[in-house]
Amino acid sequence: MDFRSDTVTQPTQAMREAMATAIVGDDVYGDDPTVNDLEVWAAERHGFEDALFTTSGTQANLLGLMAHCERGDEYLCGQQAHNYKYEAGGAAVLGSIQPQPIENNPDGTIDFAKLKAAIKEDDCHFARTRLLSLENTIGGKVLPMNYLAQARQFVDEHGLSLHLDGARVYNAAVALNVDVKEIANYFDSMTICLSKGLAAPVGSLLLGSREYIAKARRLRKMVGGGMRQAGILAAAGKLALTEQVSQLAVDHDNAEHLANQLAQLPGFSVVIEQVHTNIVFASANDDIDIAHISNQLAKEGITMPSNNSMRFVTHKDITKSDIDRFISRLKTFL
Ligand SMILES: *Cc1c(COP(=O)(O)O)cnc(C)c1O
């Protein structure tokens, strides 16, 4: 039982079989039919002209930002954005692109007044503001659809492009009960992680216009992300999108169940209203030795956070009865 992340999910049996039998070729030559199928299918499925299979979500974001921005350009993003805070500064280091982070509201949105104030005028003192990058879900929270519509209007008014870090965009779509295309529609480009709750072993997608993806494809080669018989991975990636999406609703129910159970434990608190999808933030009073409990439970094969400010992530390899067992073990320590 591993609560650290949905990235720990094991590939399904169907994925293992599809990987074993995938027809492959050299994808750098454009010869891998399984990669090509995934890219063509994913572009159509999400309402974009083209798609690119990448090694990771971090790489998809990096290529995505670099394909929008040149050296000395900047992108606006949230202070909590994965592609600002958790990607080793890649856009700045490798793309010479300046991030302009703006504080996120507690619901994950960013105020348009603050975004507007951060757009630089055309003046040689400033970086050129090119792009707004949003994230959905962000910290497990779903951005409201009307916020996305406002973001589209905002970028159109200011001549910017709009990127979505959609690592968990399917969690957002499932939580909102909308087709993922309705979310994707607002954006010029979008990433999707296949290797989180959707359970593929490796890989992400970057989606955008034909010209944009051609640029990203060149950049992918530059950063060493051109893979050869990558159809082995793409075969599992396609199943992530065709067979695993319905699992996310179960993960969300389980997260809600976990949040409710944790909230009832003495000395624990959870902001239940912020649990929209498969991520639960909880905190325990200082007099509870979470590090010790975590250590003890690790011996029983339960991996939970080790400090008092905790993040739990549900996924297909944790069932509701696992959660009940976890809660009952936790109670024995309290
Ligand atoms: C996980 C994640 C990424 C990066 O994905 P990796 O495949 O781990 O590199 C990007 N953005 C968000 C919001 C994520 O949660």
Image (cartoon, rainbow, N blue to C red):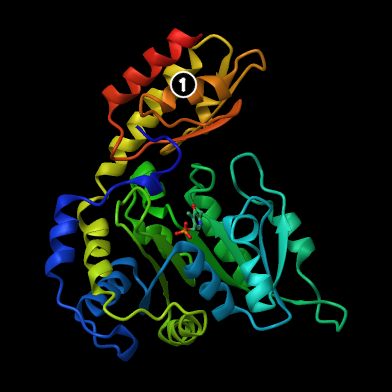
Q: Is residue 142 above or below residue 298?
A: below
The amino acid type, in three-letter code, at marker 1 is: Gln
Q: Residue visible at 45% across and 39% down?
A: 4
Q: Secondary structure at mark 1?
A: helix
The residue beneath circle 1 is 296
Q: Residue visible at 47% across and 64% down?
A: 186
**Quadrant occupied by the N terminus:** top left
Q: Is residue 19 above or below residue 195?
A: below
- Judge by depth and name the residue closer to the eye, 200 or 279: 200
Residue 72, percent from left and from top: 74, 81
Quarter assignment of residue 202: bottom left
Residue 251, percent from left and from top: 33, 37
Residue 85, percent from left and from top: 64, 55
Q: Is residue 286 visible?
A: yes
Q: Is residue 318 above or below residue 168?
A: above
Residue 311, percent from left and from top: 52, 34
Q: Is residue 159 visible?
A: no
Labels in figure, total: 1
